Image (cartoon, rainbow, N blue to C red):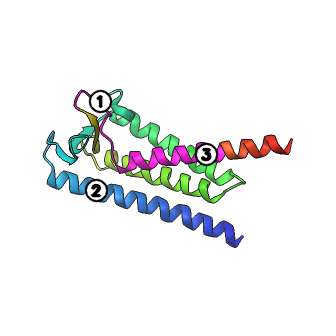
C-alpha cells in the first residue's frame, strides 16, 4: 500500500512539475517574444518563436480550438482511467503517465484561458525543412508516450519469455 501511495505521489509531482514548467515558459515567451519573431538558440537550427496553434498536434485542423479542447479532456480522462486500473505500475510507467498528464494539462490550460491557441515556441530544423513549432507540454507528451512504448515492449518481452 505504501509503495502504491509513493507512486501516486510521484505521478502527481511529475505532472505538476511538467505543468508549471510549461506554463512558466509560455509566460516568458508571451512576455519577451513578439509574434513571428525568431531568436536563434543553437544557430538557426533551434529557434524560439511565438506561434498560437489553434488546431491539433502539428497544427492540423487549424481553427477547431473547441473541438480539440473537448478531445483533449476525453483523452486525458481515458488516460486517468487507464492509469487507475493498470496493475503493473512500474516507475517508468508512472513517470510516463506523469509527463503525459502534465503535458496534456498544460495544453488544455492554454485553451481554457481563452488564448488564441496553444502557445508553441520551440522551432527546430533547417530553413526549408522545419519541424512544426512545439512547447514543453508537447515534449512531455512525446517523451511520456515513448516511455510508455518502452514499458509495453518490456512487458511483452517478459510475457513471451514466460511462455
Crowd around label 2: few <14 · some 14–19 · many ≥20 (10 Å):
some
Residue range corresponding to the magenta coloring: 127-152
Q: Residues within 10 Å of mark 3 (few under 14, many from 20)?
A: some
Residue 116 within the magenta-colored segment of the rendering: no
Residue under circle 2? 25
Residues tagged 3 and 1 counted as in contact (Cβ below 8 A)? no
Pointer 1: what residue? 63
In the structure shown, which secondary structural element does the residue marked by tag 3 occupy? Answer: helix
Say if residue 44 shows up in the picture: yes
Location of residue 89 in the rendering, given as x and y in whole percent from the top left corner: 67, 56
The Cα–Cα distance between marks 2 and 3, rounded to whole angstroms, is 28 Å
> 132 and 8: which one is in front?
132
- Specify the quadrant of the image occupied by residue 52: top left
On-image quarter of the N terminus: bottom right
* Circles 1, 2 touching at the beta carbon (< 8 Å): no
Disc on the earlier residue, 3 or 1: 1
Please determine whether, in this image, residue 118 is positioned above or below residue 1: above
Residue pointed to by mark 3 = 150
Q: Are marks 2 and 3 in contact (CB under 8 Å)?
A: no
Q: Find out whether residue 137 is within the magenta segment.
A: yes
Query: Residue 42: image x %, image y %?
Result: 24, 47
In the rendered structure, the answer to whether residue 138 lies left or right of residue 52 reads right
Residue 144 coordinates in the image, percent (x, y):
51, 48
Q: Residue at x 68, y 69 (%)?
A: 3
Can you tell which of label 3 and label 1 is closer to the viewer?
3
Amino acid at each position: 500500500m505504501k509503495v502504491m501511495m509513493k507512486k501516486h505521489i510521484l505521478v502527481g509531482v511529475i505532472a505538476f512539475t511538467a505543468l508549471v514548467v510549461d506554463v512558466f515558459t509560455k509566460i516568458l515567451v508571451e512576455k519577451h517574444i513578439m509574434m513571428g519573431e525568431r531568436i536563434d538558440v543553437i544557430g538557426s537550427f533551434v529557434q524560439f518563436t511565438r506561434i498560437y496553434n489553434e488546431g491539433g498536434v502539428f497544427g492540423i485542423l487549424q481553427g477547431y480550438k473547441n473541438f480539440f479542447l473537448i478531445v483533449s479532456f476525453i483523452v486525458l480522462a481515458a488516460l486517468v482511467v487507464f492509469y487507475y486500473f493498470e496493475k503493473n505500475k512500474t516507475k517508468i510507467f508512472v513517470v510516463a503517465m506523469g509527463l503525459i498528464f502534465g503535458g496534456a494539462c498544460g495544453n488544455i490550460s492554454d485553451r481554457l484561458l481563452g488564448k488564441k491557441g496553444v502557445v508553441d515556441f520551440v522551432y527546430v530544423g533547417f530553413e526549408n525543412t522545419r519541424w512544426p513549432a512545439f512547447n514543453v507540454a508537447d515534449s512531455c507528451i512525446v517523451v511520456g508516450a515513448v516511455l510508455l512504448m518502452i514499458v509495453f515492449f518490456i512487458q511483452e518481452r517478459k510475457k513471451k519469455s514466460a511462455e
